[in-house]
Image (cartoon, rainbow, N blue to C red):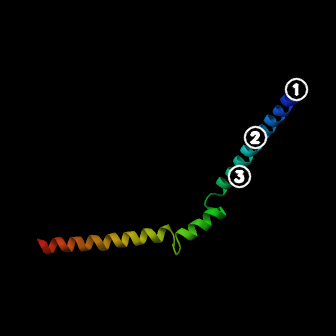
Amino acid sequence: MSAAESVAERIEADRALWAAAYAQGHADGLAEGLAQGAAHPAVVESVARVFAGWDGAEAAHARSVTHFHAWHAQARAGRKEAA
C-alpha cells in the first residue's frame, strides 16, 4: 500500500463518516421538527407573518358561511325581481 492510497482511503473514510453524521443529524432534526408540528417556532413565526390578524379556523368558517348566506340571499332576490 502506497502513501497515496493510504491518504485516498483516509479521505474516503472521512467523507463516509461526514455523510453518515450529516444524515443522522438531518434525520434527528427532522424527527424533532415533525414532533413539534404546528408548535414549532419556525412554523408559528411563519404563520403569524403570513396570516397576520387571522383569528382562527372557526372564525374564518363563520365569515365564509355569513358571506355565502348574504350572496345566496342576494342571488335569490335578483331571481325574484327578474321573474
Asked whether, in this view, residue 69 is left or right of residue 82, the answer is: right
Q: Residues within 10 Å of mark 1 (few under 14, many from 20)?
A: few
Binning the other alpha carbons within 10 Å of mark 2 as few (below 14), some (14 to 19) or many (20 upward) gives: few
Image position of 70 (left or right of 50): left
Determine whether, in the image, residue 54 is placed left or right of residue 65: right
Task: Name the amino acid, label 1.
Answer: Ser
Q: Nearer the viewer, mark 1 or mark 2?
A: 1
> Is 27 situated above or below 66?
above
Instruction: Residue under label 3, please give it.
Output: 29
Q: Earlier in the sequence, mark 3 or mark 1?
A: 1
Q: Position of residue 65 (x, y in %)?
A: 37, 69
Quarter that holds the C terminus: bottom left
Residue at numbered disc 1: 2
Label count reads: 3
The percent coordinates of residue 67 (x first, y second) are 35, 72
| Labels 3, 1: front one | 1
State the mark number for residue 20.
Answer: 2
